Amino acid sequence: MDMSQYLDVFLEESSENLQTLNENILELEKNPEDKDIINSIFRVAHTLKGMAGSMGFTDVAELTHKMENVLDKFRNDELKVDSNIITILFKCLDTLESMIENIREESGDIIDITDLMNLLDNIGKGELIAKKDEEKKEIDFVLNEFDKNIVNQAKERNYNVYIAEVILTKDCLLKSARAFLVYKTLEDIGEIVKTIPAVDDLEQEKFEDRFNIMFLTQKHEEEIIKLITSISEIEKVNLSSPTGDEAKQEVKINNKVLNEEQTKKGETKTIKNKEEEKNKKAHQSVRVDLERLDKFMNLVGELVIHRTRLEQISNNHRLTDLHETLEQVGRITSDLQDLVMKVRMLPVERVFNRFPRMIRDLSQELGKEIELIIKGEDTELDRTVIDEIGEPLVHLIRNAADHGIENSDERIKAGKPSKGTIKLIAYQEGNKAIIKVEDDGKGLDVDKIKKKAENIGIDTTGMTEADIKNLIFMQGFSTSEKVTDISGRGVGMDVVKTKISNLGGTIEVISEKGKGTSFIIRLPLTLSIIQALLVNVGGETFAISLGFIDRVININMNEIKLTNNREVILYRDRIIPIVRLSDKLNMTTGDSTNKFVVIVKVGEKTVGLLVDGLLGQQEIVIKPIGKLLQNLKEYVGATILGDGLVTLILDVAALV
Amino acid sequence: MQVVIFNIGKEKYALETRLVHGIEKMMNITNIPTAPYYISGLANLRGSIITVLDLKKYLNIYSDNEPENIIIVENDEEKIGLMVDSVQEVVEVSDDMLEKVNTESAYIKGVINFKEYIVTLLDGENLLK
C-alpha cells in the first residue's frame, strides 16, 4: 500500500503529539503526583507509537515504547518523578522531534538512539535513583549498567576508557572555569561519557577540590595526563581504566523484564482505545492544505474587487433593482471574507507553547531562577504571522533570560525576589495584535548604548532617552560584552526588527534601569484584506491602511508653522510634525491652500501626513507589486479599486 | 522560431513568442512616483497587477508616437508588460535569416533580415534581468 498520502497527516499529528507531550511532561515536573497527567502523557505517547509503528518508522516507535515503559512505572508507583528522569524524557522528545524532522525532509539521516534507549532502560530498573545517591559520595565512581555497556562497546571499537580524577590546587579561585577547561580538553580528544559531579554541578561550583570524568579516547595515558596538567591550578590527575565485564549478564535480565512489561501493556490497550474514541468525537476538524486556503483567500479577494466594481456601476447608472441584489451579495461576501480570515487565524498558543520548556532549559543552563508567565495565548493571528513570529520571540526571550534577568544574588541585593519573571502577553487592540515580552531584570543601560552608538558613529545629542534605547534595533548593535551560547552571537535585534517589519508590524522597547525591560510588538491581524483611506496627492490616488490612522483633520496651509526647521502643526495643544507626502514621493502638488492632514501613529511616533484631498474609506485587497519594484520602500503593495484602476498602498512606517 | 514584430519610433524590433504571454491594447496605467524613469507604472491585467516597462525609455530609442500596445511577457513566474508603439505581426523566421551583430548591448540577440526591411531581435531573458 502506498503510504505517502498518510505521511503528511502522520507528520502533522506527530508534531502536535510531541508538543502535547512536551507540555504535559513540564506539567508533570510541577505536579509529580498527578495521575491524570501521567495518564494523558501515556495516551499521547501511545498514539504516537501506534502511528509511527503503522507507518513503518520503527525507530520512533521503539523509542516511544521505551518511554512508555518508564511512564508505566510512574503510573504503578514503582518510580518517583524527579528532574533527572524528566530531563531524560525531554531528551527523548527532542530526539523524536529530530527524527520526525528527518522523515519530513526525507533526509534519510539516522539518529543513533541506542544511548537513549539504554538510559531509559536503566530508569526502568531504578538505576537512576541509586545513581543520585552515589553522586553525593563524589569520589566513588560507581558504574551502572549503562556505563558498563559503553565501556564494553568502546573496547570493541578499540577505544580506551579512562576515568580521570582531577584534583585542583587548594587556592584555586575559578574552580568551575578550570573544570570547564579540563572538560573541553578531554572533549577535544575523545568523547565524555559522564562526570561526577554532574556537568551542571561542575558549572555551578558544587564540588570540593576534585571531580571525576569518564571518557573514551584513542590517545595514550601519558598524553592525556600531560594535556590536563598543562592547565594551570591543577594539582594532580589520576587515571584509571574501568572494566565492564559484568555488564553483559545484566543486559539479559533487562530484556526479560521488558518482555514481561510488554505483555502487561496488552491488557491496558483496550481501555485506552475507548478513551481515544471519546476524545475524537469531542472536536471534529479537517486538515486543509495551506496552499488551498491561500487560493481560497485569493478568490475571495477577487470577489471583493468585483463586488466593489459592480457597486460602482450600479451607483453610476442608478439601478435600484441591481442595487438591492448587490447589497445581499455584499453581505455574503463580507461574511465569506470574515470566515476565510478566521479559518486562517490560529491562536498564538501555537507559538507560545514551546516557551515554558525553553525557559526551563534556559534557567538550568544559566543557573538562574526564572518564571515564565503567559497571558492571552488565545489571541488569534493570521497563519503567516504565526509561522514567522516564533523566531523573533525566541530571540527576545533568550535575551531577556540571558541579559535581562540577573542571577539570584544580584536580585536579592537589589531588593527584588530571587526568582526572575518573564512575562509573555498577547492581546488584541483595534486591528492590531500586541505581543509583549517583559522581564523584571536590570533594564537597558542607556549610558552603555550611548557609548556604543558614539563608537559606531551615531550622534546621540538631542536624542531622548527613549530614542537612545530604541537604537538597539540598529544593525551591528550589540552591547553584550561577553558572547554566550544563549545570546550575543552577532544576530542582533536588527534581525528581530526586520522580521517584524516584514510582517507589517512594529517593535519598540521601553525600559527602566533596575526595574526591567519590555518589548512591544504590534502586528496586523491579517495580511491581505484591510480597511484603507484613499487620499489624493498631486492628482494621484493612494491608499493608507486605517490601522495607522489616528484621525484626519482639515487645515489651511498657513496653519503650518516652522520650528527647528521642521514643519509642524498645533493640534489640541500638541505639536505634530508634518510630512508632505508630495515631497516624499517627488511629486508636484496642487496649490490649493485648503488641505488635509492624516494623523498617523507608528509605534510611539505621531506624524501628520499632508495630502491634497480625501476620497473615502474602502476595503482593499493588498496585492504584491512585482520584483522589478522591490526596492521601492514607500509602498507595501497595490490594490485594484472598484473602477478597475490600480492604486498604490503607502507604507506609512517607511514614510514617517 | 516564431517572433512578434513591433515598432518603436522608426525602428522594428522582435521578441521570441515563447516568452510572450499575450498582446494587449493600451491599458490604464497607474504612475509610480518614485520608480525608475523607464517604469511606466502598474496596470490591471484581468485582476492581477503587473508592472509595465516603457520599452523605448528602457532601450533609449527616440519615439514621439502614442503607444498602442503592451506585450505581456512572463519572467521568473512574474508577468511584466512591455509598452511599445504598436505590434505589427507574428511571423515564423528561419535560423538562416538571423544575423549576428557586433554590439555591446546584451539586450540584442541579432538582426533578422526580411529583405525589404530589417528587424532587431531582442534577447528577452537578458532584457528582464
Image (cartoon, rainbow, N blue to C red):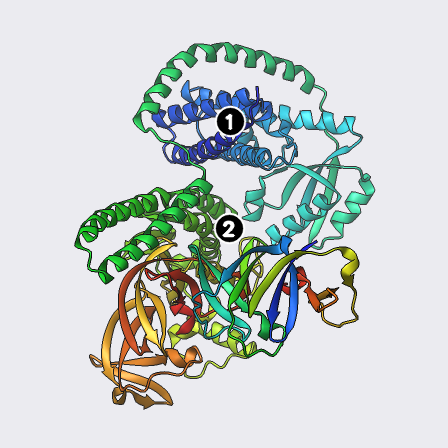
**Is residue A406 in view?**
no
Q: Nearer the viewer, residue A507 or B50?
A: B50
Alpha carbon separation for disc pair 1 and 2:
42 Å
Please state, as top left, top right, bottom left or bottom right, where the C terminus of chain A lies in the image. Answer: bottom left
Q: Nearer the viewer, residue A101 or A546?
A: A546
The image shows residue A565, relative to residue A415, as above or below, that is below
Whole-percent x, y for residue A638 in the image = 42, 62
Residue underneath mark 1: A6
What residue type is disc 1 on?
Tyr
Whole-percent x, y for residue A47 in the image = 45, 23
The image shows residue A183, relative to residue A490, as above or below, that is above
**Is residue A311 in view?**
yes
Helix, strand or loop for disc 2 = helix
Residue underneath mark 2: A366
User: For residue A609, which quarter of the picture?
Assistant: bottom left
Q: Nearer the viewer, mark 1 or mark 2?
A: 1
Q: Say if labels 1 and 2 share a chain.
A: yes
Q: Residue furthest front?
A: B116
Q: Residue at x 51, y 32 (%)?
A: A8
User: For residue B89, which quarter of the picture?
Assistant: bottom right
Left or right side of A16 for A431: left
What residue type is disc 2 on?
Leu
Crowd rating for badge 1 (residues with CA inside 10 Å; few <14, some 14–19, many 20+): few
Helix, strand or loop for disc 1 = helix
